[in-house]
Image (cartoon, rainbow, N blue to C red):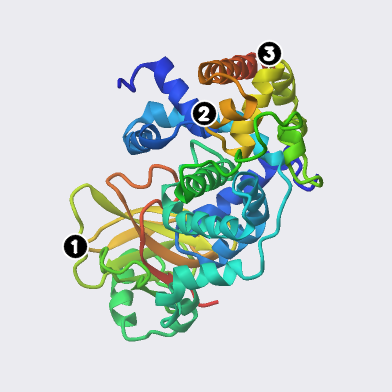
């Protein structure tokens, strides 16, 4: 079937969203979806048209048992170690790498050497995505929040067509991209307010050129929380 | 109506933030997303999958899917509530198919039963699919466009959308030839699209 024909693509997208595209036809359609931009756009357009109809459906609170069951199902394995978001609190005061990080900062902070010591954050490998890419980083930030130096600890094996993107994660709201970072050496990030509202820094695996959506799309490889 | 269609856009905006944090593996955001959306999604699933226990299993699958795929959510294309609803509807339809060949939602009274009408078959406390269509249609343009559809078109659209019925099941339900129902639905969708596009261009 020629999915590139606009009227056919549009009809299939409509039936897919309505739910009447079934069986092998739907499976074929779903297989093609990721690679076909026009098909995805047609689906998005039909979702926009039809799915607001679902707003009229009465709310039904799930039983209390659903959430704990869901948590068990998703996080049972990671529970022993706590999951990265919770473990962040434990990563304070990792001083062993402070020296290395401070050396990195020296490069940036030449014009006005800070009196206060740099803020050092270790971005530990995220155990929730084992086997993807083991990556640890150390970030050092000037106390005024204007410069950050990120260095990988050890080699980060990166496949062709992949890139690492650094994010500042606020306590509330969406993560902010700080740009692509090097897998081999130090990357310097200069911003006016790196620390304002930032609760943690995270590095995600993205397609070459960085996240196409403005939000992290790949797995989060490593993360480190700021001391408050 | 606890779930105001006018709310749809505003809620979507809040959910964009939560989803982008879920993509980072933030469990707190995932919990918040669940609290804000699970009652809506269970409502959607229950319309299609009437077995409460199975529906709650489907709901779990939906969130497992969301946790694992949040990074694949494209902020530029669909709105989050739309995306979540879409995942929920497809999972609910899958759960019907899994259960066997006989469609659960249309197995019912004998063919000579005069009262075999979609509205009489629903729990009395719940709105029927046609009423839902009318309520959802409070969203202005959609309202006008849905009302412009013929009775048959509205009825087949409501059965397919709210109850997740296939073409064959809608045909069986309305006791019409499959080809007739397919063409009602196809024309309903085209009419809806053209009408919404006209409404958007005159705004």
Label 3, label 1: how many angstroms apart (C-alpha)?
Answer: 54 Å
- Residue behind mark 1: A157
Q: Residue at x 40, y 69 (%)?
A: A223
- Residue behind mark 2: B168
Horizontal side, residue B92 vs residue B111: left or right: left
Figure check: A52 above or below A203: above
- Residue behind mark 3: B202
Quadrant assignment for the C terminus of chain B? top right
Q: Residue B45 location in percent, x, y? A: 60, 48
Horizontal side, residue A102 vs residue A61: left or right: left
- Can residue B42 be seen here? The reply is yes
Horizontal side, residue B82 vs residue A151: left or right: right
Label 1, label 2: how many angstroms apart (C-alpha)?
Answer: 52 Å
Figure check: A152 above or below A205: below
Circles 1 and 2 on the same chain: no
What is the chain letter for disc 1?
Answer: A
Foreground mark, 3 or 2, reads 2
Q: Residue A30 location in percent, x, y? A: 38, 37
Q: Residue at x 60, y 28 (%)?
A: A49
Q: Secondary structure at mark 3?
A: helix
Foreground mark, 3 or 1, reads 3
Q: Residue B159 location in percent, x, y? A: 63, 32
Q: In front: B48, or A225?
A: B48
Q: Secondary structure at mark 1?
A: loop
Label 3, label 2: how many angstroms apart (C-alpha)?
Answer: 37 Å
Figure check: A93 above or below A52: below
């Amino acid at each position: 079937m020629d999915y590139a024909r606009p009227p056919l693509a549009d009809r299939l997208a409509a039936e897919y969203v309505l739910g009447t595209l079934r069986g092998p036809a739907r499976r074929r359609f779903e297989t093609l979806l990721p690679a076909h931009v026009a098909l995805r756009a047609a689906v998005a357009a039909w979702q926009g048209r039809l799915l607001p109809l679902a707003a009229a459906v009465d709310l039904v609170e799930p039983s209390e048992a659903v959430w704990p069951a869901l948590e068990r199902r998703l996080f049972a394995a990671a529970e022993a170690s706590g999951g990265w978001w919770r473990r962040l609190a434990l990563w304070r005061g990792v001083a062993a790498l402070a020296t290395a990080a401070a050396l990195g900062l020296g490069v940036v902070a030449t014009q006005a050497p800070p009196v206060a010591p740099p803020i050092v954050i270790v971005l530990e490998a995220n155990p929730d995505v084992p086997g993807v890419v083991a990556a640890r980083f150390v970030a050092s930030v000037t106390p005024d929040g204007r410069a950050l130096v990120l260095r990988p600890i050890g080699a980060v094996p990166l496949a062709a067509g992949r890139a690492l993107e650094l994010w500042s994660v606020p306590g509330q709201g969406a993560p902010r991209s700080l740009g692509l970072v090097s897998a081999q050496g130090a990357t310097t990030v200069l911003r006016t307010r790196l620390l304002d509202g930032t609760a943690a820094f995270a590095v995600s695996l993205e397609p070459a050129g960085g996240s196409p959506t403005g939000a992290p799309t790949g797995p989060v490889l490593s993360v480190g929380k700021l001391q408050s | 109506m606890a779930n105001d269609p006018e709310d749809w856009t505003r809620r979507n905006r809040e959910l964009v933030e939560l989803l982008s944090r879920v993509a980072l593996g933030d469990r707190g955001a995932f919990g918040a997303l669940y609290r804000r959306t699970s009652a809506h999604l269970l409502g959607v699933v229950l319309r299609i999958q009437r077995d409460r226990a199975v529906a709650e299993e489907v709901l779990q699958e939906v969130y497992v899917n969301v946790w694992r795929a949040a990074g694949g959510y494209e902020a530029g294309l669909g709105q989050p509530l739309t995306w979540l609803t879409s995942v929920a509807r497809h999972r609910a339809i899958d759960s019907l198919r899994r259960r066997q060949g006989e469609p659960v939602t249309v197995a019912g009274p004998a063919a000579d039963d005069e009262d075999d009408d979609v509205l009489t078959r629903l729990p009395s406390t719940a709105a029927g699919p046609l009423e839902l269509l009318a309520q959802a249609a409070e969203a202005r343009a959609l309202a006008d466009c849905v009302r412009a559809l013929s009775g048959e078109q509205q009825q087949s659209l409501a059965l397919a959308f709210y109850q997740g019925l296939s073409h064959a099941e809608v045909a069986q339900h309305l006791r019409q030839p499959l080809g007739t129902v397919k063409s009602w639905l196809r024309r309903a969708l085209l009419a809806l699209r053209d009408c919404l596009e006209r409404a958007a261009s005159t705004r």
